[in-house]
Amino acid sequence: MIEAMSEELNANVREWVSRLRSPDNKVAYCALKELVEASGRSIVVYAHLDSFINMMRDSNSYVRTRGLTLIACNARWDAAGRIDGIIDEYLQHATDEKPITARQCVKSLRQLAEAKPALALCIADALRNADVSKYPDSMRPLVQKDICETLLFLDGRGGEGCQGTAPLTPMDPSLDI
């Protein structure tokens, strides 16, 4: 019975992974939700980490965002340290050309750091040095706020009181936190 359930999960995961690149964003989003949920319960999704890493490199920002999200969701299963090997590339998306992708990346860094505490300092350094000046005025404050909240989370304060926190003053003057 357990074996049959495991086989069914494997089959479902393979199907969901194949749907992540669907041209229909609703189909792809539903697959993402299923994979996020499955990632919290089982190591089965981690077997597709290479697919998620390739997605992180895609020209389509929606696909990149899905890849980044699933990498973070599966960091808990990464005993082999594969994510450690691509962390610099992952962190480049904290200032992705698309601000929505950047925001999702920054938010996912909390989950990644929880699963891989050894990467927390590297993550914090990247966020402190993030240059968000390229974003339009309508998006820049939102990305800045996400960065601030993630830095506060990494600092152990959970993201509250984002204004005027001296210990987390970023090195980039454009981050007016």
Image: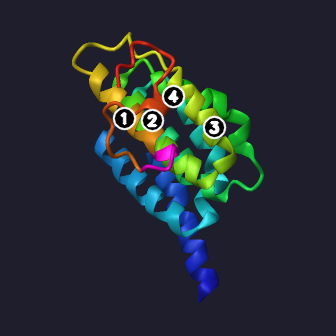
Secondary structure under the numbered disc 1 in the rendered image: helix
Residue 28 against residue 7 in the figure, above or below: above
User: Label 3: few (<14), some or many (≥20) within 10 Å?
Assistant: few
Q: What is the spatial separation of the Cα atoms under label 2 and label 4, in whole angstroms?
A: 8 Å
Closer to the N terminus: mark 1 or mark 2?
2
| Residue reaching furthest to the bottom | 1
Secondary structure under the numbered disc 3 in the rendered image: helix
Dividing the picture into quadrants, the one containing residue 152 is top left
| Residue reaching furthest to the left | 138
Q: What is the spatial separation of the Cα atoms under label 1 and label 3, in whole angstroms?
A: 17 Å
Give the left or right position of residue 46, taking residue 173 as reference: right
Closer to the N terminus: mark 3 or mark 2?
2
**For mark 2, what is the residue?**
106
**For mark 1, what is the residue?**
146
**Disc marking residue 121:** 3
Closer to the N terminus: mark 1 or mark 3?
3
Q: Amino acid at mark 2?
A: Val
Image location (x, y in percent) of residue 67: 51, 40
Q: Amino acid at mark 3?
A: Leu
Closer to the N terminus: mark 4 or mark 1?
4
Q: What is the spatial separation of the Cα atoms under label 4 and label 3, in whole angstroms?
A: 10 Å
Q: Amino acid at mark 4?
A: Leu
Closer to the N terminus: mark 2 or mark 4?
2
Q: Check if mark 2's residue and mark 4's residue have beta carbons within 8 Å.
A: yes
Secondary structure under the numbered disc 4 in the rendered image: helix
Residue in front for this viewpoint, 115 or 55 = 115
State yes or no: residue 119 in magenta: no
**For mark 4, what is the residue?**
127
Q: Check if mark 1's residue and mark 2's residue have beta carbons within 8 Å.
A: yes
